[in-house]
């Protein structure tokens, strides 16, 4: 079993419900054992800004799935939620990304681990820090150190989550 971290994001069709349902689906998916989940955060869009705020979170899992099989599982869950790929960084019902897969470094035509730019994005680092400030992002440093370098002003914890 390999410890992996998954980012969850949504800004369409009741985003809080989308994220909560995705957490449940991760719990039920064969080969995935959810070890923990962050709080939910309301975040400002990055890149394409003419869209609603996002709800973001992270999950820590253990999995026996290979990185590519895990990607397939996450994309299947996205499809169940009606995910359509259109505008880069645009609105979406659900986005599930593999952030880390153990200490593996991988880059091929389908998958890059660690997830590109995760070390620069408060909407990823803040939920990760919620779970463990000591997470190491290979090639970039620890979450606690990286948080000091990013603007966190667009990230707000949703009370009660």
Image (spheres, helix red, strand yellow):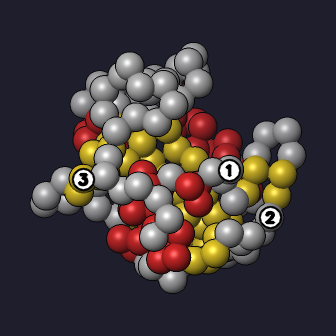
Q: Residue at x 41, y 25 (%)?
A: 49
Q: Nearer the viewer, residue 6 or 77?
A: 6
Horizontal and vertical percent position of residue 92: 44, 27
Instruction: Say how many tags the image has.
Output: 3
Which is nearer the eye, 3 or 133? Answer: 133
Q: Residue at x 13, y 58 (%)?
A: 159
Percent position (x, y) of residue 143?
Answer: 52, 73
To which quarter of the image does residue 141 belong? bottom right
Q: Residues within 10 Å of mark 2 (few under 14, many from 20)?
A: some
Q: Give the CA separation, mark 3 to mark 2.
A: 30 Å
* Image spot of residue 121 (x, y percent): 50, 52
Distance from label 1 to label 2 (Cα)?
11 Å
Residue furthest out toward the bottom: 134
Tell me the SS state at disc 2. Answer: loop
Are discs 3 and 1 less than 8 Å apart at CB? no
Q: Which quadrant is home to the C terminus? A: bottom left
Q: Which label sits on residue 105?
A: 2
Cα–Cα span, label 3 and label 1 = 23 Å
Residue 156, numbered circle: 3
Which badge, 3 or 1, is on the more N-terminal residue? Answer: 1
Residue 106 in the figure: left or right of residue 79: right
Q: Residues within 10 Å of mark 3 (few under 14, many from 20)?
A: some
């Amino acid at each position: 079993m390999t410890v992996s971290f998954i980012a969850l994001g949504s800004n369409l069709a009741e985003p809080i419900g989308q994220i909560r349902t995705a957490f449940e689906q991760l719990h039920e998916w064969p080969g995935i054992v959810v070890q923990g989940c962050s709080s939910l955060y309301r975040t400002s869009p990055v890149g394409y800004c003419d869209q609603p705020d996002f709800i973001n979170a992270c999950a820590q899992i253990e999995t026996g799935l290979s990185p590519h099989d895990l990607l397939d599982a996450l994309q299947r869950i996205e499809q169940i939620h009606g995910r359509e790929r259109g505008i880069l960084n645009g609105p979406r019902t659900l986005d599930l990304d593999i952030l880390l897969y153990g200490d593996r470094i991988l880059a091929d035509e389908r998958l890059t681990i660690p997830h590109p730019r995760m070390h620069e994005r408060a909407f990823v680092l803040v939920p990760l820090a919620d779970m463990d400030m000591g997470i190491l992002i290979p090639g970039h440093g620890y979450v606690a150190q990286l948080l000091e370098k990013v603007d966190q002003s667009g990230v707000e914890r949703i009370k009660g989550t």
